[in-house]
Image: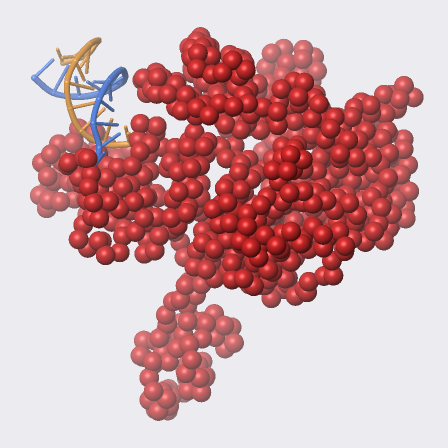
Chain colours: A red, B blue, C orange
DNA sequence: TGCTGTACCATT
DNA sequence: ATGGTACAGCAC
């Protein structure tokens, strides 16, 4: 078993295979699958993952592994298998699948450097560059006087050499400790001998005579109100010593969480949790769909199920959409399980994420709460996987590997023989359909734990407002209600239902809209930098003073951004204190929580924001929720538009009147008759499900069919269309006759980064060979991809059809 | 003849 | 992805 099969860190389809390496003597005893290694690859050195050890290789000229980066495997055998499955299932590269399962800092950093080998003098330019040093970064060659040829010659001469370095991005946090190094009597002697002037040194030394334990340096400095120099003096005298010890960065101070006990369950909750507990007890794997209205106590069910898993000595993964939005969620888990919980989400720094990940890796915790990628937590005895708000789009990763966390969870659940819980007030249609077909087990929670009714939803027809001469974005009823609540000292949440919160600029004179020169999309105005930016390629230009097309100065930014609504709102109700929550006001780290805290402390009357305020917030003083434009998503070319609208309206309605004060919801719309709006206002999920299923059946969309989206891009418009056409043709040849292939169609954003994008959509019910077929097509186009810069990307379960 | 840009090719 | 190489084009 002295040969290792390695997946190397080269994201190219021609490299999407294992490479064999000899394991040198010094690594034979310790090298295991799942460890990272450094291997020579062509002229350079790169990182790779060992997936297997074998005895033989069909390749005869094997190179040796240059180094091993881990002492223990970072991928368990299960995760190695899962990575393979994931890559194949999503038609992605093995390397991208493995990288997706690990924290960012475990990815390799590559550097090149030049070493001076000979003492003899080099060319004047090279001498200047090295400036007496033996090693210099390779990058120093740029903007220097040295030309490439000189370097090549020097290398051939053996005067200098290029080194390829693989650097770890891992940084660890250390705390410095201070401790005495001599026996007590020696310290006492030293204290006597010390000059009377060194007051602080004496104090410190006296302290350590009574105290032989190591103490954190910073706390000593604080306690004695002194500085490092005092300590250094004692260290120099050989009386004290400092040493460093690694500590985890802990983003949450565990002690600040109030401990909670299990709550008494309602009858409904008990009925829902029973089969889950049974599953846990019997090591059985079922997928449970927990359909519970907001406030029905889903989280308590999660907590008590997890308790069973912990008692059994097993581990739990809890996925939440985006945890920084719900500090309440962290609080509940830390409150119940204390330091037995690791938290993984995008609000943490890379270092913090790594430390939390390591607490899982080292089995220091049994519970992980985190966003999408936490589904890969390296536990080996999983007892339960929970996906909260399972309908959320953020569980689908939109770049390679394009996976859905739900699929991964179910796969891991089957492997570990443990239950998977999908919880939501508005389950994804796919999930509910599966529950309906008894593929998943359905549990319904129809009542709130406090038995409060859901707030009344009043739908306001904005067309009538217009006819009545009200041209503002606030209906009369919303205005009156807001004033009434604010005067009573209650609070209001206002939701602007917009997917993009971008503001584009348009000339009022000629209608010219400023677009990105490289992409077919309007540029977005950014107030803080007064720049126009492209969200797709990061192109930037200053905000023009005059219209580039007609030179008029009537160029303004457009779009009903939250800023404009805020302005209108302060005009409409001058006494209201408005808190605006959007990308601009939440950009800074922690800004999000700060704003929410301000609102919780009643520093504002109205919280105005986009989708981000719809989820998981719980303010007891909020009695009115207003939705300004409920139908703005309905016109998007997205077959899930109705579903998303229904989900959003239901979620946001749950924000009002959760406590003692009764709540009310006002929904403004131009299409009050639309079933998603009408049924959301009645909280009728079942009716919505049935109606929407009919639509999906009629137009052949999921869950009636599976989708696959292939996007082809090329700098040349014609080439892009032609290649897509060819792909469509060869698909037609090999799929069943019931399968539908649409395309070539231009992608909704037809050009990005100067590349034209065409797509083809496959709608199928049963195509077991589809992935093989797509891979075959990929290979057919290998030449075009390598030589002529054609790009083909595949999404086996598209959520965003761009 | 020597320098520069580029297409192509292999990587265990 | 990325570095090496063969080769074409061009100035001297």
Task: Kindly tell me whether residue A18 is visible in this rendering.
Answer: yes
Instruction: Give percent across and percent down for residue A160.
Output: 15, 40
Q: Nearer the viewer, residue A683 or A785?
A: A683
The residue located at (76%, 56%) in the rendering is: A266
The answer to which of A732 and A295 lies nearer the viewer is: A732
Q: Residue at x 65, y 27 (%)?
A: A640
Residue A173 appears in the picture as rendered:
no
The number of numbered badges drawn on the structure is 0
Left or right side of A761 for A683: right
Is residue A2 toward the left or the right of residue A552 in the image? left
Q: Quadrant of the C terminus of chain A?
A: top right
**Along the viewing direction, whichever of A198 and B5 lies nearer the viewer:** B5
Residue occupying image coordinates x 32% and y 44%: A51
Which quadrant holds residue A231? bottom left
Relative to A629, A518 lies left or right: left
Residue A560: percent from the left, percent from the top? 72, 27
**In the image, residue A142 above or below residue A424:** above
Q: Please report the residue visible at 55 percent of the width from the left and 23 percent of the height from the top.
A: A765
How far from the left and from the top, in percent, is residue A115? 19, 44
Judge whether A71 appears above or below A116 on screen.
below
Q: Position of residue A97 (x, y in %)?
A: 42, 38
């Amino acid at each position: 078993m002295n040969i290792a099969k390695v997946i190397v860190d080269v994201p190219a389809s021609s490299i999407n295979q294992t490479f064999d390496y000899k394991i040198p003597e010094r690594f034979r005893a310790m090298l295991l699958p799942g460890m990272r290694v450094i291997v020579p690859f062509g002229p350079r050195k790169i990182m790779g993952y060992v997936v297997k050890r074998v005895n033989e290789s069909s390749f005869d000229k094997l190179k040796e592994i240059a180094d091993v980066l881990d002492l223990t495997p970072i991928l368990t055998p299960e995760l190695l298998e899962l990575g393979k499955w994931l890559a194949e299932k999503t038609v992605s590269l093995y390397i991208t699948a493995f990288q997706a399962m690990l924290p960012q800092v475990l990815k390799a950093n590559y550097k090149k450097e030049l070493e001076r080998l000979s003492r003899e003098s080099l060319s004047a330019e090279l001498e200047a560059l090295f400036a007496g040093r033996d090693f210099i970064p390779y990058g120093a060659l740029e903007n220097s006087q040295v030309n490439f040829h000189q370097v090549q010659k020097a290398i051939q001469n053996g005067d200098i050499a290029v080194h390829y370095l693989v650097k770890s991005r891992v940084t660890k946090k250390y705390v410095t400790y201070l401790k005495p190094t001599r026996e007590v009597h020696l310290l006492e002697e030293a204290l006597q001998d010390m000059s009377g002037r060194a007051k602080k040194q004496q104090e410190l030394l006296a302290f350590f005579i009574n105290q032989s334990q190591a103490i954190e340096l910073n706390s000593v400095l604080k306690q004695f109100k002194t500085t490092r120099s005092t300590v250094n003096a004692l260290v120099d005298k050989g009386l004290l010593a400092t040493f460093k010890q690694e500590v985890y960065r802990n983003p949450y101070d565990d002690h600040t969480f109030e401990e909670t006990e299990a709550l008494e369950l309602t009858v409904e909750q008990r009925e829902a949790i029973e089969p889950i507990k049974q599953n846990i007890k019997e090591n059985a794997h079922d997928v449970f769909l927990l359909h519970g209205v907001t406030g029905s106590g889903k989280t308590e069910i999660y907590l008590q199920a997890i308790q069973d898993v912990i008692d059994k000595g097993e581990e739990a993964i809890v996925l939440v959409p985006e945890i920084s939005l719900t500090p309440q969620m962290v609080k509940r888990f830390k409150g119940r399980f204390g330091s037995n919980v690791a938290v993984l989400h995008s609000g943490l720094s890379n270092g913090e994420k790594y430390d939390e990940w390591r607490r899982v890796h080292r089995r220091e915790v049994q519970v992980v709460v985190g966003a999408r990628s936490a589904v890969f937590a390296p536990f080996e005895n999983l007892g339960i996987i929970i996906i909260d708000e399972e309908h959320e789009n953020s569980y689908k990763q939109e770049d390679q590997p394009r996976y859905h966390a739900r699929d991964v969870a179910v796969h891991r659940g089957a492997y570990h023989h443990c239950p998977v819980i999908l919880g939501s007030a508005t389950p994804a249609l796919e999930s509910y359909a599966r529950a309906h077909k008894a593929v998943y087990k359905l549990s319904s929670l129809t009542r709130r734990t406090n038995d409060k009714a859901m707030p009344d939803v009043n739908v306001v027809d904005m067309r009538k407002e217009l006819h009545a001469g009200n041209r503002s974005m606030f209906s009369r009823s919303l205005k009156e209600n807001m004033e009434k609540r604010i005067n009573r000292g209650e609070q209001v949440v206002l939701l602007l239902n917009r997917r993009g919160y971008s503001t584009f600029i348009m000339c009022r004179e000629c209608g010219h809209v400023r677009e990105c020169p490289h992409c077919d999309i309007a540029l977005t105005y950014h107030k803080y930098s007064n720049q126009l930016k492209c969200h797709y390629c990061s192109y930037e230009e200053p905000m023009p003073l005059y219209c580039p097309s007609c030179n008029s100065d009537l160029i303004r930014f457009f779009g009903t951004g939250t800023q404009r609504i805020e302005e209108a709102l302060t005009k409409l109700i001058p006494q209201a204190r408005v808190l605006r929550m959007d990308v601009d006001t939440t950009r800074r780290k922690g800004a999000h929580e700060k704003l929410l805290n301000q609102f919780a402390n009643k520093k504002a009357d109205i919280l105005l924001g986009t989708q981000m305020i719809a989820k998981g917030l719980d303010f007891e003083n909020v009695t009115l929720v207003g939705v300004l434009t409920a139908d703005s998503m309905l016109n998007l070319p997205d077959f899930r538009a109705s579903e998303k609208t229904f989900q959003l309206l239901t979620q946001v309605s749950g924000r009002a009147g959760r406590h003692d004060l009764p709540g009310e919801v006002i929904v403004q719309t131009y299409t009050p008759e639309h079933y998603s709006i009408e049924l959301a206002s009645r909280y009728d999920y079942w009716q919505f499900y049935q109606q929407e299923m009919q639509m999906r059946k009629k137009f052949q969309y999921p869950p009636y069919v599976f989708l696959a989206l292939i996007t082809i891009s090329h700098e040349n418009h014609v080439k892009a269309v032609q290649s897509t056409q060819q792909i469509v043709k060869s698909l037609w040849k090999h799929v069943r006759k019931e399968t539908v292939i649409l395309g070539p169609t231009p992608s909704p954003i037809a050009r990005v980064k100067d590349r034209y994008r065409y797509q083809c959509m496959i709608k199928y019910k049963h195509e077991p060979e589809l992935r093989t077929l797509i891979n075959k097509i990929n290979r057919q186009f290998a030449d075009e991809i390598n030589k002529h810069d054609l790009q083909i990307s595949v999404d086996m379960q598209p959520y965003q059809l761009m």
